[in-house]
């Protein structure tokens, strides 16, 4: 019992020396972390968009020589949408920076996480369509073009083409998903943790 009492006294002394954080102090800490996370989401999206533009205009010559417009039109249509998402990330950052209440901060976090999830889903969808189209075009070109492929192909050739497109697409989607989980997933997890802390703070 004596040892227990000594431990209790020692703990009380240590507890008394620890800084006392008020409700406002805790809120400010969570707000700063959340604002920083959303800012990094915006910065990463700008870098990603810039790299996409650079790769598109400096693509290898064999991509430029392709006579199929499906992929080009898909990319042309996707960039305005991606630019819109970048704008949304910027707006989310500005809103979360101006938030002054726990409820408002929680809503900003939910909005930011939802935007990132929609952005990832859109990019993975575009990557899947582009990969399937490119795989089919490359396979058919290797067989001598569409006319030669339709004339000489059999059921086994169609199955090989489907398997080839699915395999390539699965690899590309896996890589893209891994990169997104590494970059955005880390920030989303931190935002989710901040949201849970705010929920406890509100209670």
Image (cartoon, rainbow, N blue to C red):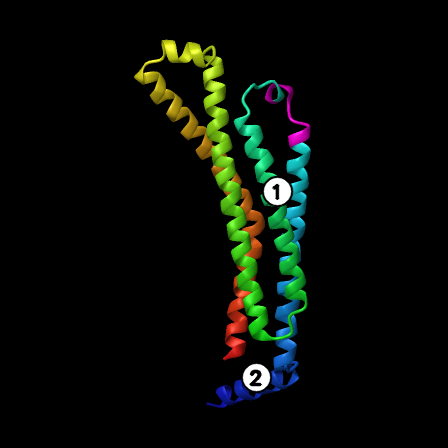
Magenta stretch bounds: 56-63
Q: Nearer the viewer, mark 1 or mark 2?
A: 1
Tell me the element at label 2. Answer: helix
Q: Is residue 139 left or right of residue 13?
A: left
Crowding near the residue tagged with mark 2, few <14, some 14–19, many ≥20 C-alpha atoms within 10 Å: few
Q: In the image shown, does 86 or 161 lie closer to the viewer?
A: 86
Residue furthest out toward the left: 155
Query: Magenta stretch mostly in which secondary structure?
Result: helix
Q: CA distance from mark 1 to mark 2?
A: 59 Å
Q: In the image shown, does 154 or 175 lie closer to the viewer?
A: 154
Residue at 64 percent across and 23 percent down: it is 60
- Give above or below for 170 relative to 118: above
Mark before the other along the chain sequence, 1 or 2: 2
Tell me the element at label 1. Answer: helix
CB-based contact (under 8 Å), mark 1 and mark 2? no
Q: In the image shown, does 65 or 14 lie closer to the viewer?
A: 65
Q: Which mark is residue 50?
A: none
Q: Is residue 74 magenta?
A: no
Where is mark 2, residue-wise?
11
Residue at 47 percent across and 24 percent down: it is 135
User: Where residue 140 appears, x then y in whole percent?
Assistant: 45, 17
Crowding near the residue tagged with mark 1, few <14, some 14–19, many ≥20 C-alpha atoms within 10 Å: few
User: Where residue 40 appears, x then y in whole percent?
Assistant: 65, 54
- The image shows a total of numbered marks equal to 2
User: Where residue 108 appears, x then y in whole percent?
Assistant: 58, 65
Residue at 60 percent across and 83 percent down: it is 15
Residue at 66 percent across and 36 percent down: it is 53
- Give above or below for 81 relative to 148: below
Q: Quarter-wise, where is residue 83 in the image? A: top right
Where is mark 1, residue-wise?
80
- Give above or below for 87 relative to 131: below
């Amino acid at each position: 019992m004596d040892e227990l009492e000594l431990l209790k006294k020692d703990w009380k002394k240590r507890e008394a020396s620890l800084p006392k954080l008020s409700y406002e102090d805790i809120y400010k800490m969570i707000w700063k972390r959340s604002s920083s996370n959303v800012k990094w989401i915006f910065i990463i999206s700008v870098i990603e968009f810039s790299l996409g533009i650079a790769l598109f205009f400096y693509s290898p010559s064999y991509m430029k020589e392709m006579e199929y417009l499906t992929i080009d039109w898909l990319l042309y249509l996707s960039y305005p949408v991606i630019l819109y998402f970048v704008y949304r990330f910027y707006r989310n950052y500005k809103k979360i920076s101006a938030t002054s209440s726990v409820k408002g901060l929680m809503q900003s976090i939910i909005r930011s996480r939802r935007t990132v999830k929609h952005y990832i889903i859109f990019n993975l969808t575009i990557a899947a369509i582009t990969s399937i189209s490119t795989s089919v075009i490359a396979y058919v070109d290797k067989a001598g073009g569409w006319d030669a492929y339709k004339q000489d192909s059999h059921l086994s050739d169609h199955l090989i083409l489907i398997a080839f497109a699915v395999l390539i697409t699965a690899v590309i989607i896996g890589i893209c998903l891994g990169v997104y989980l590494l970059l955005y997933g880390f920030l989303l997890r931190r935002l989710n943790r901040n949201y849970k802390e705010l929920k406890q703070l509100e209670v």
